[in-house]
Each structure stands twice: as structure tokens, then as C-alpha cells.
Amino acid sequence: MNAIQKPGVRPANPQFSSGPCTKRPGWSVDALANAFTGRSHRAKEGKARLKAVIDRSRVLLGLPDDYLIGIVPASDTGAVEMALWSLLGARGVDMLAWESFGKGWVTDVAKQLKLDDVRVFEADYGHLPDLSQVDFARDVVFTWNGTTSGVRVPDGDWIAADRAGLTICDATSAVFAMDLPWDKLDVVTYSWQKVMGGEAAHGMLVLSPRAVARLESYTPPWPVPKVFRLTKGGKLMADIFEGATINTPSMIAAEDALDGLAWGESIGGLRTLIARSEANLRQIAGWVDESSWAGFLAAEPATRSCTSVCLRITDPAVAALPAAGQAAFAKRMVALLEAEDAALDIGAYRDAPPGLRVWTGATVEQADVKALLPWLDWAFATAKAELSNKD
């Protein structure tokens, strides 16, 4: 077998992981030199650093003045579960799931909280559930962007402005990269490790006035662990939203979050961050249009994620393989790319259909996405040739 010619240019940064995601362009560990280490996070300056993360996030995202934003434990997962444990049970709840994380929230509500009045609307990977079935007299829990499926809701038009229930949105791979209609979202969660390329372990929780009113008027019938508690004596623990965290945060991670926010501000703010992600998606979409072997997992163009781009292998010979064979083929492509330092960590999520997942959030340079695409073709051709030789 003759060796298939490799592309002449590699991405300058081959890090396309979907979490933790690549750092901002030009990042180095020097960005953490002034981290408030070896001191209490409750000291005046420590609390001020945490409050700065909150305040600058508010401004960069354009949050309404009456929305609260706080730093909470355990990344986006902790933020979501804090909301579920603290807010649900007052009304029936509609759960939307079309990928693994959304299905995880269904498990939390149905099997852990064991709520009686739960409706679940599910769709296979690549699709959205029928959003018209949602009843906004009930609480609604959903992901804005399905990180493991590459499928996002196209907009917020389907969400009722006059809803009686709360909308609880896991937006960890959407915040800072997609337009969010804040007036239609009562709880939004995300983590530093996604679009802004921060360090892991910390979550962000955004609450609307309606969510705060629920917290102060409703007490769940189940025990609420300390790290999930948002109220004391029937009143919101407001300090959480002023930099007084529930448990000890990493001040190095907080410094890194501040660095990412400063970068976002310096390049033009939210509109620029969104534009960078959308430009990366367009780069891949143009390549997919010409590809003989790759397609989007997202069935509808309007639902294609601009951060977690999931690709399936459409080549007939590979598609005809059993599921295990398709998975092995995709893993071989991933291994080839990693060995060449052309792309790192781009395998599909373990629960998702076999394929590739390329992170294209705001910290990813468009030039690196452009350089990656010929390498994807090379990896496919090489793996296909190996498969043919086995036959």
C-alpha cells in the first residue's frame, strides 16, 4: 500500500477537546502569576476577586440587572443539580432530552428526586424533541446545546413569555457562544471550562427574579445537601451571589476565569465571541458540503451547534459496518490524528453514535479549524485503506 500523502500544514493549536476546552489564544501559565493563593477566599481581596468574576461575567453576557449570578461547586453538573434539588416539586415538570447530559437530568428527577408528575420528551441523537409539546404551566428542564450530540435549540421562540412555571436551562456549551434570550430563562447554568477555556470544578448559576421567588416561597420535601442549599430560614443566601462561595474555591481557577473574561472584553465582547464560534461552524459546514464521507450528526441545519460540532461517517462501506466496527473505525481516525499532533481529543462522546466531535468555541482560531479539515480527510483515507487491506 502506498502511503497517503499528509497535508503540509498542521493546526498551530491541535486542541479541539469539548471539555475542558482549549485556552484563549496566547494563553500561558504567566496569566496566573497574580492568583490570590495561600490566603483565605473569605479575605477582603479574595472575596473581591470572586466578585469580579461575577460582575465581569454579568457585563460580558449582558444579564438583566435584576438577575443574580453566583459561583457554585462541582462545575455545571453541580449548578444544574443545585437548581433541580432546590426548585423542583412545586409544579409538574417537563424534561427534554436528546443527548447524554439531558438524559442524566431525567435520571436525577425521575429516579433520585422521584417526582410524581414528570413528563419526558426524548429524541435520538441528531434530533430535537417536539418542542411544541412543552407545557409552560409546568417547570421545564432542558439543555440549550447538546454537547454530546451537536444539536442545539435554534432559538427561544418556542418558550412562552407568559409562562407560569420555571425554565431551567443547562447552557454550559452555549453561554458566551450563542444568543440566549435571558427574559425567557429563569435558571441558567454553565462552567468556566467550556467556551471561555477556563479551569474545571466550578459552576455558575444564574437566577431570574421568578426563580428567587420560588426559592423563597417553596421548601422541597427532601433533604437538601449543604452544597446545594440556596436559602436559609426561607430567605435567599444572597452572599453566594456576591462572591461568598458555599465551599472553598480554587483561587487559581478564579484567576484563570478572570483572564478569560479580560480576553473576551479585549476582542470586542459577546458579539465577537459568538461570531468567532459561528465562523468556525461555517468553516466546517463548507467542508461537509463537499465531503464524500462526512456529515453532521445534527439532522437540521438550524440545530447545528457552533461549539460542539459532531460529525458522522457517511461513507457507505463504513456505514455498513456493525456498530462496533464503525466505532473502531472512528477510533482509528482519532488515533491517527493524535499521533500526528493534528487533532487531540476529538472522538465522539462515549454514549453518542460513532464519529468525531470537534470543539469550535470562541477560543478556537478559525485558521486552526481550516488547517484541521485536510487532516480529517487524510485520517479517513488512511483508515479506509487499512480497512480495505484487511478485507
Image (cartoon, rainbow, N blue to C red):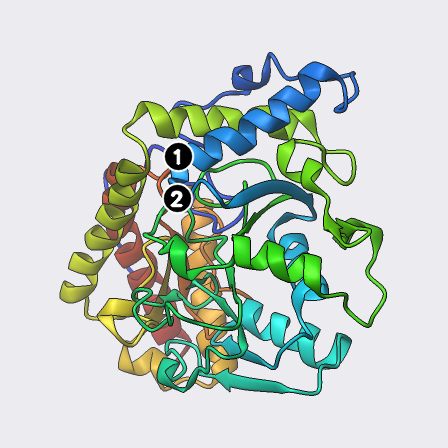
Query: Which residue extends farthest top?
Result: 34
Q: Nearer the viewer, mark 1 or mark 2?
A: 1
- Cβ atoms at labels 1 and 2 below 8 Å apart: yes
User: Which amino acid lies under the numbered mark 2 shown in the image of this protein?
Assistant: Phe
Image: 16 above or below 87: above
Number of marks present in the image shown? 2
Left or right side of 304 for 322: right
Residue 222, given in percent of the width and then of the height, sits at: 83, 70
Left or right side of 219 for 190: left
Asked which quadrant contains residue 234, the reply is: bottom right
Which quadrant, please, contains the C terminus? Answer: bottom left
* Residue identified by numbered label 1: 60
Please give the name of the residue rendered at 72% of the width and 36% of the height, measured from the top-left corner. 245
> Which of the two discs, 1 and 2, labels the residue nearer the N terminus?
1
Q: CA distance from mark 1 to mark 2?
A: 8 Å
User: Which amino acid lies under the numbered mark 1 shown in the image of this protein?
Assistant: Leu
Residue 212, given in percent of the width and then of the height, sits at: 61, 54
Front residue of 14 and 211: 211
Asked which quadrant contains residue 53, the reply is: top right
Left or right side of 32 for 313: left
Please give the name of the residue rendered at 26% of the width and 53% of the height, measured from the top-left corner. 281
Q: Residues within 10 Å of mark 1 (few under 14, many from 20)?
A: some
* Residue identified by numbered label 2: 176
Please give the name of the residue rendered at 46% of the width and 77% of the height, measured from the top-left corner. 136
Front residue of 237 and 157: 237
As drawn, the label of residue 227 is none
Viewer can see residue 10: no
Query: Under tag 2, what secondary structure?
Result: loop
Residue 189, given in percent of the width and then of the height, sits at: 55, 53
Q: Residues within 10 Å of mark 2 (few under 14, many from 20)?
A: many
Residue 140, given in percent of the width and then of the height, sits at: 52, 73
